[in-house]
Image: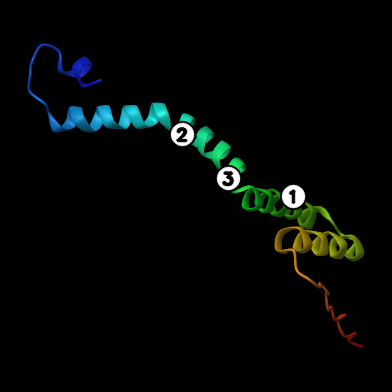
Amino acid sequence: MESLFRGSTEEKSPIIVVLSTLAIAALFSPVRHRVQQVIDRRFFRRKYDAQQVLAAFAVTARDEVEMDALTAALLRVVDETMQPERLSLLMFSPKETG
């Protein structure tokens, strides 16, 4: 890569080294990201699955307006990601002012 910038001179300019390093990093970054995803799915499956479940719950929490459906979704997410032995949810209803 440096040889493209250097031309016929044999001097190594620090700017040329930096530019060529940045160019190589930019070219290989998407490949590295894709390989990292494959490795995460293969070797860190539980963590990968938990991230996917939490991302899906974020969409549900943003769009859901019914409390029973949101509660069921929350309990499902906690069960799938944390896998507790027992799970319960304690909720208080707001006091009515009047």
Q: Nearer the viewer, mark 2 or mark 3?
A: 3
At 10% from the left edge and 11% from the top edge, which residue is drawn? 8
Q: Nearer the viewer, mark 1 or mark 2?
A: 2
Three-letter code for the amino acid on which mark 2 is drawn: Arg
- Side of 58 where 70 appears, left or right: right
Q: Nearer the viewer, mark 1 or mark 3?
A: 3
Identify the residue position indicated by label 3 in the image.
43
Three-letter code for the amino acid on which mark 1 is drawn: Ala
Secondary element type, mark 2: helix
> What's the CA distance linking mark 1 and mark 2?
25 Å
For residue 30, above or below residue 74: above
Identify the residue position indicated by label 1 in the image.
56
Q: Residue furthest top?
A: 8
Identify the residue position indicated by label 2 in the image.
32
For residue 11, above or below residue 87: above
Q: In front here: 19 or 75?
A: 75
At 31% from the left edge and 32% from the top edge, which residue is drawn? 22
- Side of 51 where 21 appears, left or right: left
- Side of 48 where 77 appears, left or right: right
At 20% from the left edge and 30% from the top edge, which residue is drawn? 17
Secondary element type, mark 1: helix
Q: Position of residue 63 (x, y in %)?
A: 81, 53
> What's the CA distance linking mark 1 and mark 3?
22 Å
Q: In front here: 40 or 67?
A: 40
Label whose residue precedes the other's in the sequence (1 or 2): 2
Q: Quadrant of residue 29?
A: top left
Do the CB atoms of the residues marked 1 and 2 lie less than 8 Å apart?
no
Q: In front here: 65 or 83?
A: 83
Label number found at residue 21: none
Q: Quadrant of residue 69?
A: bottom right
> What's the CA distance linking mark 2 and mark 3?
16 Å
Q: Residue furthest bottom?
A: 98
